[in-house]
Image (cartoon, rainbow, N blue to C red):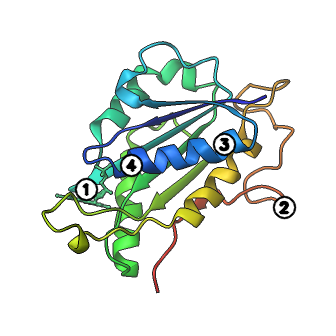
Amino acid sequence: MSKILVAFATRNGSTREVAGAIAGTLRAADCAVDLRPAREVREPVAGWDLVVLGAPIYSGRWHSDAHRFLRRHRNELANVPVAVFGMGPRSGAEEGWQRSRGQLDRALAKRGWLAPVTIAVFGGVDPPKRRPTERRDLRDWEAIRAWAFGLPALVRSPTRSAPDSRPDRPLLGEPGGVPSDWLGPRET
Ligand SMILES: Cc1cc2nc3c(=O)[nH]c(=O)nc-3n(C[C@H](O)[C@H](O)[C@H](O)COP(=O)(O)O)c2cc1C
């Protein structure tokens, strides 16, 4: 059974709900999953077969808890695959999706040592307002679950864990693998 840590950062809760849906999908696929706020993960993460790290983008910056998580666990993450997601555009405009993706890419470029096995951008949610009907919510739960469904194929191989060795699973972009940089769903 694969052991997967789903670590998230959030300000207003929408990313926690997405992380929860991802954890639920993984559990349904018989994975042993721990769902935790990234800031609470202080112990080494070397024992996990995959780490999923998700956080929202605010004013062009990926949530600082996600950055701290990567700094804190840098050494162990050399040998643990990391799947990353960011949130999120709040309008269906293509430009907004590209902007968010660019912001996430720039955040990840600060961790030159990190080579995520997959990167996704999911639609975001407006912060709580007085009238909930005014709240935009671009989360596409089907797409989120579909992304999560592909994650077990990306776990660390039990026999070959060196970062530069070819894993036993399909590589990204190969038949049976998942796209290496899957940009989240767009609204038409
Ligand atoms: C003040 C503010 C600034 C934001 N800036 C960005 C941004 O620069 N890029 C982006 O992709 N999303 C941005 N967002 C959208 C958030 O990432 C989105 O609302 C997300 O769902 C928030 O996650 P949380 O509920 O887990 O805190 C912003 C949202 C707010 C309220």
Which amino acid lies under the numbered mark 3 shown in the image of this protein? Answer: Leu
User: Which residue is at a point 40% across and 21% down the rendered structure image?
Assistant: 72
Whole-Å distance between the Cαs marked 3 and 2? Answer: 21 Å
Between marks 3 and 2 in the image, the one whose residue lies nearer the viewer: 3
According to the picture, the residue beneath numbered tag 1 turns out to be 60
Mark 4 sits on what residue? 15
Q: Is mark 4 within 8 Å of ligand 1?
A: yes
Question: Depth check: 85 or 16 in front?
Answer: 16
Measure the alpha-carbon separation of dots 4 and 1: 16 Å
The CA distance from mark 2 to mark 4 is 30 Å
Residue furthest out toward the left: 130
Label 1 packing within 10 angstroms: few (<14), some (14-19), many (20+): some
The N terminus lies in quadrant: top right
Q: Which residue is mark 2?
A: 175
Residue 45 in which image quadrant = top right
Among numbered discs 3 and 1, the one appearing first in the sequence: 3
Mark 1 is on which residue type?
Answer: Gly
Residue identifier under label 3: 26
Between discs 3 and 2, the one toward the N terminus: 3
> In the picture, residue 39 is in which quadrant?
top left
User: Callout 2: helix, strand or loop?
Assistant: loop
